[in-house]
Image (cartoon, coloured by chain):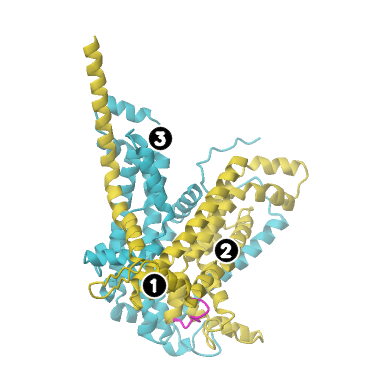
Chain colours: A yellow, B cyan
Amino acid sequence: MAARAETAQQTKVNRGRRTDLTGYLFVLPFLIAYGLFLVWPVILGLRMSFFDWSLVGTGTTDFLGLANYRELFGDPDFWASLWHTILFTLLSTPPLVLLALGLALLANRAVPARWFFRLAFFAPYVLPVSTVALIWVWLYQPGFGLINSYLVSLGLPEVDWLAGENVAMISVVVVTVWWTIGFNFVLYLAGLQEIPEELYEAAALDGAGSYQQTRFITIPLLSRTTFLIVVLQILASLFVFDQIYIMNTSGGLNYTVTRPIIQYVYEQGFTQYRVGLAAAMSYVFFVLILVFNIVQFVLARRRRREA
Amino acid sequence: MTVTEARTPGEIQEKTEGSGRRSLGNWLAFGVLLLAAIIWLIPLAWAVDTALKTEADTTAVPVSWIPASGFTFESFTQVLRAGNLLRWYFNSALTSSAITIIVVVLASLAAFGISRVPFRGRSLVFWVILAGLMVPPQVLIVPLFTEMDFFHLIDTYPGIILPQIASPLAVFIFKQFFDGLPHELEDAARVDGASRLRIYWQIWMPLSRPVIAAVAIFTFVLSWNNFILPFIMVTNTEMMTIPVGLATVQSSYGVRYADIMASAVLGGLPLIIVFLFFQRQIVQGIANTGLKS
C-alpha cells in the first residue's frame, strides 16, 4: 500500500518535472531572443555609460564613473534637446487626442461613406516616415510650396515654415498630426462601438438631444479609451525622432529649435563617437520614461479600483 | 424591439439603421468630415501631381495643379531606372517578412507555454516578459549597435532582423487569446496521448488564425516602416530599407522635386496597396491590439 502510494507520488513528481521542462522549452526560444536583443543591450548600455567608450577602433574603455553623467547635466544642448522633446509632446498630444475624438464622434453618426473617411484619415499612418517628411518639406517650401502659394493668393504673407524659429516646431506638430491621427481615430471608433445603443435610446426617450447624449453618455463612457489614447500618445510623442531628423538633415528644418533628445543621443553616439556619453543620455531619458510609466500605471490601477 | 446583435469584441461595425434618419445634424457632420478628409488627402494628391509634372513645371509660380507642359511619367521611370528603389523594396520585403514570421513563431510558442503548460515559475516568466514593454527600443540604439558590430552584423540582413524579433507585446496578445480558449479541446487530445507540441501546432494554431493575422499585420507594418533601427544598422546604400533609403534621396536628387515626389510616392505605394486590400483587418487589428494593451 505505502509503496504504491510512494510510486504514485514519484510519478507525479516526475510528471511535474516533465511539465516544467516542456514549459521551459516552449518559452526558451523567445527568452533567448529577449535576452540577447533586449535585456543584454539594457545591461550593456548601463555599463557603457560609466566608461569612455568609443565606437571607433578597439573601443578605449577607461572607467569614468559618473563623469559622463556629470558632463551631460552640465551640457546646455542636452537640456535644450530634452526640452524640445517635451515641448513636442505638449504641443502634439492635445490635437492628436481631441481632433481624433472630434472626428470619431462625427464619423460615428449615421453619415454616408464612412469607409471613405476611415481611409482618408488612416491612410497616412501606413506611409513610411520618409515619404511623409519628403511630402511635407515640399508643401512647406517658400514661393512654389503649395501652402505658401495659397497663403499668398489669399493676400496673406508667406510663412517660413521650415526655418522660422517660432514656427518650426509647429510645422513638425502639423506633420505628425496629419501622419498619425488615424491611429487614435481608429481606437476611438472602436471605443465608441462598445457603448451600448440602448443607452442612447433610453436617453432619447428622456428627451436628451444629441449634444446632451454626447456630453453625458459618450464622453464619460469613453474615458477608459481616452486614458489609453493619452498614455500611448504621450509615449509615442516622447520618442519623436524620425520625422524631425529627416526634416532637419535634408529638409532645412530649423535644427536649433527642434532637435529632440533621441537625435542628440544619435549624434553623440554615431557622429561624435561619444558612445559612453550617448549611453548615459539614453539612460537619463529612460529613467524619465520609467517614471512616466509608473505614474500612468498607478493612475490606471486607481481608476480600475474606482470603477 | 430589435434583437441586439452579437458582436465580436472590438469589431468596428457599420451603423446601418437606428439613427439612420438623415437629420440636419448628420448632414452637418458629413460636411465637416468631408472638409477634413479633403484637407487630409490634399498632401497625397499634391505629391502625386508633382511627380507627374516635368521638373520645370514643379517650381512654376503661381502653382498650378495642371502643369503647362502636360503630365508625364518621366520621373517615375527615371527613379525606377536610375535609383535603388527596387533594391530597397526587396530589402524591406525580405526583412519585414522574416521579422513577422519569427515574431509570430517565437511569441506564440512562448504564450502557449505560459498559458497552457502549468510549469513552475511561469507567472514570473510572464512578468519578466511584460517588463520588456517598458523598454523602448529607441533608448537602446547605442548598445544595440555595439552588440551587432561585435557580431559583425552591420550592413547585413540579420543585423536589421534580429533586433526586432523579441516582441513582448506579441506574447501578451497571444497569451490573452490562449487564456480565453476552452480547455476541453486540449484535454481530449491529451487523453489521446498527443504531445504538447502537436497540440500547439495542430489544435491551437489553426484556432488562432485571427490573432496570428492581427499580430502578423501589425508586426509587418511596424517593421516595414521602422526607421531608426535599420538606419543605425546600415550604411551601405544597397542594404537600405525603403524608409532609410528614401531619407537619402533629397540630398542625392538636389532640387529635382518631381523625382523626389515620385520616389516618395513609390516608397509609400506598397503599404497603401496592402492597406486598400486589407483595410478592415488592419484597422480592426490595430484597434484590438491598441485597446487590449
Q: Quadrant of residue B157?
A: bottom left
Q: Is residue A14 left or right of residue A136?
A: left
Label 1: which residue? A266
**Which sits in the foreground, A64 or A265?**
A64
Badge 1 vs badge 3, beta-carbon distance below 8 Å: no
Question: What is the chain identity of the residue bearing mark 1?
Answer: A
Label 2: which residue? A93
Q: In front: mark 2 or mark 3?
A: 2
Secondary structure of the residue carrying numbered label 2? helix
Q: From which residue to which does the magenta span run?
A: A251-259
Up-down relation of residue B257 to residue B151 (above or below): below
Secondary structure of the residue carrying numbered label 1? helix
Q: Amino acid at mark 1?
A: Tyr
**Crowd around label 2: few <14 · some 14–19 · many ≥20 (10 Å):** many
Extreme right residue here? A207
Label 3: which residue? B181
Q: Amino acid at mark 2?
A: Thr
Q: Amino acid at mark 3?
A: Leu
Quadrant location of the N terminus of chain B?
A: top right
Alpha carbon distance from label 1 to label 3: 45 Å
